Amino acid sequence: MRNILAIIEREMRAYFSSPIAYVVLTIFVFLSGVFFRTILAQVMQMGLISQMQAQQFGPRPMDMPGMISRGFLSTMSVILLFMIPMITMGLFSEEKKRGTIELLLTAPLTDLQVVIGKFFAAGTFFLILLVSTWVPMSVLYFYGSPASGPILTAYLGLLLYGLSIIAIGVFISTLTENQIISAVLSFGVIMLLWLVDVMASQAESTSKEVLTYLSILSHLDDFTKGVLATSHIVFYLSLMLVALFLTYRSIDSLRWRG
Amino acid sequence: MISVENLTKRYAAKTAIENVSFKVNSGEILGFLGPNGAGKTTTMRIIVGYMPASEGSVRVDGFEVFDNPLDVRRRIGYLPENPPLYLEMTVTGYLRFVAKIKGVPKERLDSEVTRVMERVSVSDVKERIIGKLSKGYKQRVGLAQALINDPPVLILDEPTIGLDPKQIHEVRELIKELAGKHTVVLSTHILPEVEQTCHRVIIIDRGKIIAVDTPQNLRFQLQGVERVHMEVDGPVADVISKLKATPGVMDVHKLTESDGRCRLQIEGQLRKDIRSELARTVVQSGWGLLELQSATMSLEDIFLKLTTAEEEGKVGT
């Protein structure tokens, strides 16, 4: 446990002693602010329209804070798609390039501890990103009273979604010594898991079901609606475990190949 | 302390080392000598448990490296050829990290880091960023990293590579001081290094051990092909043919010739002193013996000899 914490701590220091952490954080906070503002404006406009309609057809209830948070948090999933490869790209590739991997793999650590340490290090940074979205989100609580249930499930969904993308990124960073290749490759793979959704809409029957299930994004929908379904949680957890297992095997093969 | 048996490492395309066996005694400094690509790094990486062997076994302090990798790694301090440094960290921060992953207890963390920094004299740069340090300091920080938690075995891959002469001297002195308390295996392709620091030498070439001995014995062994330089005043052709006929002499080469004098190099049989025989031959023939000298071979010669001999063998087969 102490070993894992030491790896996480070192990795966090590395993030914040390079420009990557600051660039990612700045861009993420900026973009989430812009998106929040845009979504807020859209929902307000819809509110005005529905107010006018209410004069003709009678009042209809409208959950404006809910619409805002739902729109905002699902947009986050898109921004994270671009940000997470930046967090994971260097985890192993940089160690391979600098030769520090030899230190980790000859220290009295198990490979599993190394993998988990790296995964949680990126996970911790990702948590910081998630927490930063509370700045715009708090506006909702300040001026309105959104239902907290769907917001909490949406965050749980984003957490699981983010961690499974991170696991994929961690795996890919073991494959190359080059950070850029690692980032681009991760981005490509995640994008593919994303586009499965589009393919699903064109497919039929069984293949449609399979493709929909594989889509990394479709599983997020229910979370943002406030639905907590086991199948979605299982999907993200299994994706995460498969990617981490592949990472573990990849390190083993690294040892054999030298 | 370390026992290596029939170690073989095969990659897809080539065999890096083949049937390597040796033992290292407690407190000894063993030198691993060989040209680049001879298999030194591979052997060391297998010993420290970085990579598994295709065949054979390595035991460190009784623990098999493949079966009990963590027990072995706890007993080894390893300095790879490129010191594994996180360039963005400070020296203290880095060594604290290494101490943590090597399982140094929390209460001893600071004292252990201070101890190794003093041991390799890097205390004066302890708050500096490693990436900004000179090559010599980086190497010493790498060495400090290997010394953390006071492991009984030190495996040092080319510890003096890329250092200036003064730094090389310092590192060698440090290694010598470490012997006794630690068992040291170091690799190098620089011969004086082995002569100066090691108790025993293993010469390895193309993945095979070709000699194991003390530096002194190795030198003696090859001196067995007794090489003598002579300067003789007399008819050159006669001198050469007469000397060739002398018992114990295998070959005679002419080095230089002027004014009826010649310098010769004579190669005699293994471990046989032919100098008195040669002197007698020359004197009995009535020529002038101007100089007679045993040509001691440096380890460098031995090394060159050994590897060239191997090459010739390969060509022959």
Image (cartoon, grey):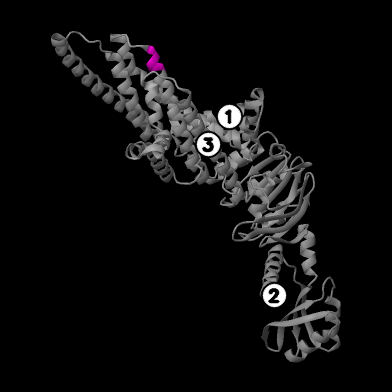
What kind of residue is marked 1?
Ile
B292 above or below B59? Answer: below
The chain letter for the residue carrying disc 1 is A
The tally of labels here is 3
Viewer-closest of B155 and A117:
A117
Relative side of A38 to A99, left or right: left
Q: Secondary structure at mark 3?
A: helix
**Location of residue A41 in the rendering, given as x and y in whole percent from the top left corner:** 21, 20
For residue B139, say whether it is visible: yes
The residue wearing badge 3 is A242
Magenta span contains residue A238: no
The chain letter for the residue carrying disc 2 is B
Q: Residues within 10 Å of mark 3 (few under 14, many from 20)?
A: some
Query: How far apart, in angstroms, are the residues tagged by discs 2 and 3?
Result: 51 Å
Q: Residues within 10 Å of mark 2 (few under 14, many from 20)?
A: few
Check residue A4 in the rendering and tell me which mark sits there, or answer none.
1
